[in-house]
Image (tube, rainbow, N blue to C red):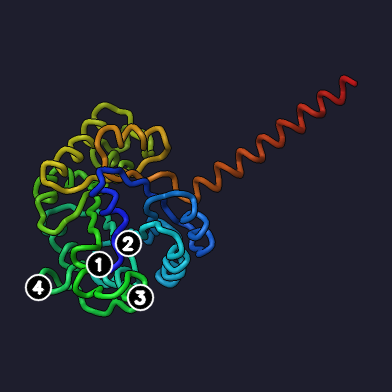
Amino acid sequence: MKANRIKSLWADGKPVLNGWLSIPNAFTAEILAEQGYDSITIDLQHGLIDYQAALGMLQAMRASEVAPLVRVPWLDPAAIMKVLDAGACGVICPMINTGAQAAELVSYMRYPPSGTRSFGPTRAVFSAGPNYGAEADGNVLCFAMIETAEGFNNLDEIVATPGLDGVYIGPSDLTLGLTGRRYPFGFDREEPEMVDAIRKILDAAHRAGIRAALHCGGSAYAAKAIGWGFDLVTLPNDVRLLAAASGASVADTRKLIAEGAGAASQR
């Protein structure tokens, strides 16, 4: 079976830079897959993407060496098993609040006797290579999202779940869960209590011998998170990148036009 690029980087002591796709388009996925990310996540929870679109996006990314992840909409065995069968090399599952839910998540990703995954890797047997059935359990990655007060309070039992590869912090929802609406919505938290909470999750994961990932809103915060010890950081998604680049292009053009008009009026 083809090696999981994320696990290979971790084995070499290197962090993973993860991209994020919310636009349901194979060409967008293909473009991002050629930009140097180590992994890219297709977002079926908050992204505008359904299963059929996700399949085409997974196919479009295959030509690159990027590792394809999928964030599923919920703790649902059907959704989890289908994206694995479609060729995802890892799953990020939102709103994991207890150790029991984390154990459920793990079971849906592993074949018996380790779990309850049904065998039928329709595309994965081609995209991931031969011997998929025998090697998938040790190759696909299972991330539980910690993003609620309940999940934070049950952190130790979640990270101790056998077979869980890592926790993934959703900082916006975590801030809502822990502080209500005391702070603005957003990813890159600077409030001392939220930084403490984020680093507590990181430390708990590493004590348990698993990985920690953080969703970031910008490059500077992602680099800082790597400095803290995070194993995977997510950079801005396709929507934000498109909006930022197009907005900057329009603003720069208008500025140059205005400067040209001013120069012309002085002649």
Q: Which residue is mark 2?
A: 73
* Nearest to N terminus: mark 1 or mark 3: 1
> Where on the picture, by quarter, is residue 162?
bottom left
- 263 sits left or right of 119 in the view: right
**Mark 2, mark 3: which one is toward the viewer?**
3
| Labels 1, 3: front one | 3
The amino acid pointed to by label 2 is Pro
Q: Are marks 2 and 1 in contact (CB under 8 Å)?
A: yes
CA gap, disc 2 and disc 1? 8 Å
Where residue 113 sits: x, y (%)? Answer: 9, 73
Which residue shows up at 14% across the image and 45% down it? 155
The percent position of residue 96, horizontal first and vertical second, equals 20, 54
Q: Nearer the viewer, mark 3 or mark 4?
A: 3
Residue 173 appears in view:
no
Q: Earlier in the sequence, mark 4 or mark 1?
A: 1
Q: CA distance from mark 3 to mark 4?
A: 24 Å
The Cα atoms of the two marked residues, 4 and 1, are separated by 20 Å
Query: Disc number at residue 113?
Result: 4
The residue under label 3 is 126
Measure how far apart labels 1 and 3 are at the Cα level: 25 Å
Q: Is residue 239 visible?
A: yes
Give the camera-side residue of 172 and 5.
5
Amino acid identity at mark 1: Asp
Residue at 37% in and 49% down: 18
How far is disc 2 from disc 4 in space, using C-alphas?
A: 26 Å
